[in-house]
Amino acid sequence: MEEETSKLPLPDTFLDFLQTNGIDPLIYTAIESTPRYIRLKPGSEAYIEEIEAEIKCRLQKVNWLPGFYSLSPHIQIANSKPYKEGKIYGIDAASGAAVLALDISVGDHVLDLCAAPGAKLCMISDLLGDSGTVMHADFLLLMEQHFTLMPLRDRLDSISCEFALEENKDTFTEWTSRRPWKERKRAARAKENAASRLVSETDHPELIFYGKTSGVVGLSKYELYKTVSSSEFSSSGYDKVLVDAECTHDGSIRHIQKFEHWGWETLNGRVLNAERSDNLTTLQLKLLKNGFRLLRVGGSLVYSTCSLTVSQNEDVIEWFLKENSSAALQEIDAAKDWPCKSGRIPKTLRFDPVTSKTSGLFVAKFKKLAV
C-alpha cells in the first residue's frame, strides 16, 4: 500500500535555503506518514490496553527504542487520562535516541543543559530511577554564559531555576518560591533584556537552582564563582551532559507546517534570517563549550539539534574540536540498529522523516579525555 503523503507549498526562499544546506525537500512531504511517539513511564506496560482505550488509538511498539510507541500523527494526548496520571509522555523517537546515546548508568550525575519543554529530562529521570542525580537548566541568561554548576546531591526533576540571596548579603540561602517584590522585578527585567543582548562570558548567571543539601547554601558569590584549576574542575564534573541546543527547527516538519498558518513571511525572520542564524551558531558553540566544561574527565556529552543545516551541526562540531584538544568524537554503540544516516562528519548521525520516520535531528557524542 502506497504511503499517504501531504506536500507543503514551500516558498522559493525556503527551497533555496534547503538547497544551500543540502537538505532534500522531500522530507517535507512526509507529514502524514510520520507518526507521533510516546514513551511509557517504567511500570506502565501493564496498562497498555487501558491507555489504548483512553486515547482511542492502537500503540505500535518501536523495536529499536525501548519504552517507545508510535501512534497516529493526529492523536492528541495532553488531555488524556494516562498523560495526566503520568503513565505516558510525548517525545519524538529521535529525541529519545539522543538521550539513549548518553548511555546513562545507575548512579550517574547528569546535566540536561537545554531542558525545555522537558520530555528528555523525564526520560533521563526514568533511566536513573532512584539513583544518581539530574540537573536541568533552560534560561537564556544561563545558557549564553560561561557558568559553573556545582555537583549536586539532591535529585531534581522539574523545579524552576532561581538564585535566592538574603537581603543586603552576598550569601546564598535555601531557594523559596516566595520572593520579595524587588527580586521578582529584577528577574523579570533580566528576562526581558536577555532576548535582545548576548551576555558577557564574565557575567555571573542570574538563574540557577540548587537543592538545600547541595553544598551551595551559605556560600558567597565569590566562593561559588572563584576560578578553579582545570584538573580540580574536571574531577568534580558531571558524568553525562546533554546539550540539545536551540536552533532554527527546520528539521521538524510539523514546526515548518505551522508557517502555513503563521504566514510564510514569518519564516524569513525565524529560520532564514542570516543575522539570527549567526547568533544561533554562536549560542550553540557557547552551549557546547559550557556543557563540556562541566563534564568530568572520562564523561560523555551528546550534542543535538532539530536543524538539518550544516552550519548548526557539522560546522559547530568542527569549530569546537579545533578549540578543545580534550574532546573526542565517539561512536554511538546503540546506533547500529537505528534507522538513521551518517552525518557529514564520521561518527555523527542524522535522523529525518523519510529515512527514520521521525522528526529531523542531528546527534554527535563526545568523550572528555585527560590531557
Image (cartoon, grey):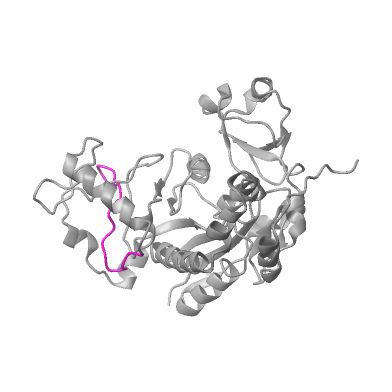
Q: Position of residue 223 (x, y in %)?
A: 18, 61
Q: How many marks?
A: 0
Outermost residue toward the left in this view: 168
Q: Nearer the viewer, residue 245 or 61?
A: 245
Task: Identify the residue shown where x is 73% and y is 28%.
Answer: 58
- Relative side of 208 to 133, left or right: left
Q: Position of residue 146 (x, y in %)?
A: 34, 65
- Relative side of 315 to 243, left or right: right
- Relative side of 172 to 296, left or right: left
- The residue stretch that appears in magenta: 198-214
Task: Identify the residue shown where x is 57% and y is 29%.
Answer: 43
Q: Position of residue 202 (x, y in %)?
A: 27, 68
Q: Main secondary structure of the magenta part?
A: loop
Q: Nearer the viewer, residue 215 or 17?
A: 17
Compared to residue 46, the image places residue 313 above or below, namely below
Q: Position of residue 274 (x, y in %)?
A: 53, 68
Q: Nearer the viewer, residue 6 or 144?
A: 6
Residue 181 visible to an observer of this rendering: yes
Quarter occupied by the N terminus: top right
- Relative side of 315 to 353, left or right: left
Q: Nearer the viewer, residue 229 or 166?
A: 166
As for residue 200 lying within the magenta part, the answer is yes
Task: Identify the residue shown where x is 68% and y is 20%.
Answer: 53
Residue 304 visible to an observer of this rendering: no
Quarter occupied by the C terminus: bottom left
Task: Identify the residue shown where x is 47% and y is 72%.
Answer: 369
Compared to residue 138, the image places residue 123 above or below, namely above
As for residue 49 lying within the magenta part, the answer is no
